[in-house]
């Protein structure tokens, strides 16, 4: 089920003194099974962009197509939102029920499923995100930041989306929490779901994504496989973005004559290349 945007432009508060163009003429397609990272400086339009992909925001001009259908013309937006699940930047905006279990049941209970099917979907989703049954009856608001994120992800997964969009899923978590959440997202992608992830971390994007889209002042200025986009180190730097740490270190070492391969973006790849160099000296 491909997702496409064509000449997508969005203006907040048009015709008022607060008018601001958040997205500027974006055209691109995301195919089945991709793991796409969306990066860009704060205010570059990342959250505004992804909210268009499941019709939470309607374009000022241009169109969004899900499986070839213009989602803003669709009579059944609810069905499209089920297929394209969005986890918000702040999980507090998404959670609202008294208990974790009720919260995760909310989505599937609106799909016309039997009570048993709703329960099974919620249980499976909670298991996928690693939330044990001892927290299912707690209020989601009493949980830690990382656990709230998991509940928010489970609530979307319980509807079995074909595309999962996450807005900064690891932001504000400690290193263990980050790697747990990202491990969950990776497993969901490995299971066949298309994943679109907004992230401030070049390292996370380099490690997980196959493609990266760079937004700058509302325009998609770079879009391609990791190795192609991160080749533009100077352009990225001008936008206030850095290379993944391993790529930056590789560049610095090569400037000192190390002669490492250009396409190193992760700590794992760098340590392998360095070991190989040391062992063959
Ligand atoms: N509700 C709103 N009303 C008016 N302007 C908004 C609103 N939400 C966002 N904007 C503006 O639109 C632009 C894009 O914002 P957006 O939140 O999409 O950026 P972002 O890339 O997600 O930023 P961040 O990295 O901080 O989350 C910014 O200039 C922002 O100030
Ligand atoms: Mg944002």
Image (cartoon, rainbow, N blue to C red):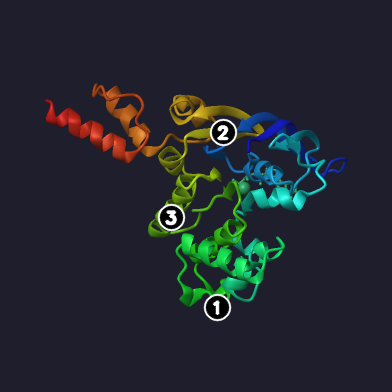
Residue at 75%, 53% (x, y): give it: 78
Cα separation, mark 3 vs mark 1, equals 24 Å
Q: Position of residue 49 (x, y in %)?
A: 67, 41
Point out the tag, 2 or 3, that comes first from the N-terminus: 3
Where's the C terminus, which quadrant?
top left
Point out the tag, 3 or 1, that comes first from the N-terminus: 1
Answer few, some or many: residues within 10 Å of disc 2's Cα (few below 14, many 20 plus, some between 14 and 19): many
Disc ID at residue 137: 1
Residue at 27%, 25% (x, y): give it: 260
Q: Position of residue 272 (x, y in %)?
A: 24, 35
Look at the picture and state if 46 lies above or below 115. above
Cα separation, mark 2 vs mark 1, equals 40 Å
Answer few, some or many: residues within 10 Å of disc 3's Cα (few below 14, many 20 plus, some between 14 and 19): some
Can you identify the residue that label 2 sits on? Answer: 214
Point out the tag, 2 or 1, that comes first from the N-terminus: 1
Answer few, some or many: residues within 10 Å of disc 1's Cα (few below 14, many 20 plus, some between 14 and 19): few
Disc ID at residue 178: 3
248 vs 205, left or right, is left
Residue at 41%, 57% (x, y): give it: 180
7 vs 137, left or right, is right
């Amino acid at each position: 089920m491909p997702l496409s945007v064509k000449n997508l432009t969005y203006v907040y508060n048009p015709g008022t003194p607060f008018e601001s163009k958040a997205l500027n003429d974006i055209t691109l397609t995301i195919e089945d099974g991709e793991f796409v990272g969306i990066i860009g400086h704060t205010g570059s339009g990342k959250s505004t962009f992804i909210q268009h992909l499941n019709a939470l925001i309607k374009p000022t001009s241009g169109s969004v197509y899900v499986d070839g259908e213009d989602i803003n013309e669709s009579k059944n937006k609810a069905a499209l939102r089920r297929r394209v699940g969005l986890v918000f930047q702040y999980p507090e905006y998404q959670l609202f029920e008294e208990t974790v279990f009720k919260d995760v049941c909310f989505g599937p209970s609106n799909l016309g499923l039997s009570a048993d099917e709703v329960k099974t979907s919620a249980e499976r989703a909670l298991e996928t995100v690693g939330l044990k049954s001892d927290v299912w009856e707690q209020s989601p608001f009493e949980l830690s930041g990382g656990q709230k994120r998991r509940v928010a992800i489970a609530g979307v997964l319980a509807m079995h989306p074909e595309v999962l969009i996450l807005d900064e899923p690891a932001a504000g978590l400690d290193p263990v929490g980050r790697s747990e959440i990202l491990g969950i997202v990776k497993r969901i992608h490995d299971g066949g779901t298309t994943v679109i992830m907004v992230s401030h971390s070049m390292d996370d994007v380099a490690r997980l994504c196959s493609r990266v889209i760079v937004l700058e002042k509302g325009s998609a200025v770079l879009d391609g496989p990791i190795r192609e986009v991160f080749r533009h180190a100077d352009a990225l730097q001008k936008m206030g973005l850095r290379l993944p740490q391993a790529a930056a270190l590789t560049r610095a070492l090569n400037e000192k004559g190390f002669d490492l391969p250009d396409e190193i973006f992760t700590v794992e790849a760098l340590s392998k290349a360095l070991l190989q160099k040391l062992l063959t000296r």
